[in-house]
């Protein structure tokens, strides 16, 4: 057994994206080598609707999956395929952008908007797969309870309990972990897989440090994650998957392997041939 050390801590800084949404860009463009296959993590934690109401109006995606999970709040969603729906308290929307969608994501006023959007890269061979949605509702998410802990399994398997997703293209472990003050959480993982956690609330002690909320911790070499919640307890999202180790060409919401593929996407957006699957 080798306990994973902290490799890097990110997050903390607030910025604006979309039409003016205040968020914590936890990981992004410059982090992609270390966090592969995860491209981006945006975190929402807002009590003032002014901070998010302008939302993310119509924009395209190609070559990635976006996974939106809200502990609280509501985001209305619509797209070029005519899909329409709402992601709210405890729901997760797992969208495969694949060959291309154009969609909008518009948060609605609520007392608290708390959650994240994760971008997972698609393997080269699957970049142009058909777009798809999986709407995961709270009753579909199993909850594993232990001493001082509650673990929601959104994707992958935890203590022999499988979540509603596994990740069709990138097998992903996605857990929502609630820890009471001083509770311990350990997990054995494939040492080759990327692992990071985002602290939604509270703090954790790991590798001799206490790390507060709104930060992410990327872990280094080892096969065992070991955490202990701080005095306020902790709410953590945990993400792990095998790196793709493929070239990345990234322009805004489109992530391909080469600059030629990006140029094709831009041309198709201009001439109206971007959408391959209606
Ligand atoms: Fe989007």
Image (spheres, rainbow, N blue to C red):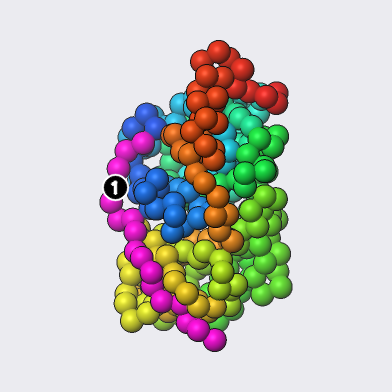
Between residues 66 and 88, which one lies in front from this camera angle?
66
Residue 120: x %, y % from top left: 55, 48
Query: What residue is drawn where x is 54% and y is 26%?
Result: 265
Residue 2 on the magenta segment? yes
* Image side of residue 68 versus residue 231, left or right: right
The crowd level at tag 1 (other Cα within 10 Å; few <14, some 14-19, many 20+) is some
Secondary structure under tag 1 reads strand
Residue 233: x %, y % from top left: 40, 72
Q: Quadrant of the C terminus?
A: top right
Compared to 88, does 173 lie above or below? below
Query: What residue is drawn where x is 55% and y is 13%?
Result: 271
Label 1 within 8 A of ligand 1 by Cβ: no
Residue 192 on the magenta segment? no
Query: What residue is drawn where x is 71% and y is 73%?
Result: 160
Q: Which residue is mark 1?
A: 14
Total numbered circles: 1
Magenta stretch? 1-17
Q: Quadrant of the N terminus?
A: bottom right
Residue 4: x %, y % from top left: 46, 77
Residue lying furthest top: 271
Query: What residue is drawn where x is 58% and y is 38%?
Result: 63
Asked if one can make out residue 93 in the rendered structure from this viewpoint, the answer is: no
Residue 12 placement: quadrant: bottom left
Compared to 236, does 92 lie above or below? above
Asked if one can make out residue 221 in the rendered structure from this viewpoint, the answer is: yes
Residue lying furthest bottom: 1
Between residues 246 and 121, which one lies in front from this camera angle?
246
Compared to 277, does 131 lie above or below? below
Residue 144: x %, y % from top left: 63, 71
């Amino acid at each position: 057994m080798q306990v994973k050390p902290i490799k890097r801590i990110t997050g903390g800084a607030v910025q604006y994206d979309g039409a003016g949404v205040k968020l914590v860009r936890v990981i992004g463009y410059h982090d992609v080598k270390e966090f592969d296959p995860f491209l981006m993590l945006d975190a929402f934690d807002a009590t003032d609707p002014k901070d998010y109401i302008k939302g993310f109006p119509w924009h395209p995606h190609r070559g990635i999956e976006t996974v939106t999970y809200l502990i609280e709040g509501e985001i209305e969603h619509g797209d070029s395929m005519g899909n329409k729906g709402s992601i709210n308290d405890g729901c997760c929307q797992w969208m495969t952008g694949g060959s291309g969608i154009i969609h909008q994501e518009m948060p609605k006023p609520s007392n608290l908007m708390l959650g994240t959007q994760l971008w997972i890269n698609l393997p080269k061979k699957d970049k142009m797969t058909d777009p798809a949605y999986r709407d995961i509702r709270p009753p579909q998410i199993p909850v594993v309870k232990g001493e001082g802990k509650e673990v929601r399994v959104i994707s992958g398997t935890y203590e022999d309990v499988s979540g509603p997703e596994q990740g069709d293209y990138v097998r992903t472990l996605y857990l929502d972990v609630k820890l009471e003050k001083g509770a311990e959480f350990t997990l054995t993982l494939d040492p080759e897989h990327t692992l990071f956690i985002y602290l939604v609330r509270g703090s954790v002690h790991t590798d001799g440090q206490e790390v507060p909320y709104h930060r992410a911790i990327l872990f280094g070499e080892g096969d065992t994650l070991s955490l202990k919640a701080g005095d306020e307890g902790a709410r953590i999202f945990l993400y792990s998957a095998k790196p793709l180790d493929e070239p990345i060409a990234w322009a805004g919401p489109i992530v391909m392997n080469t600059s030629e593929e990006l140029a094709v996407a831009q041309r198709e957006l201009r001439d109206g041939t971007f959408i391959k699957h209606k």
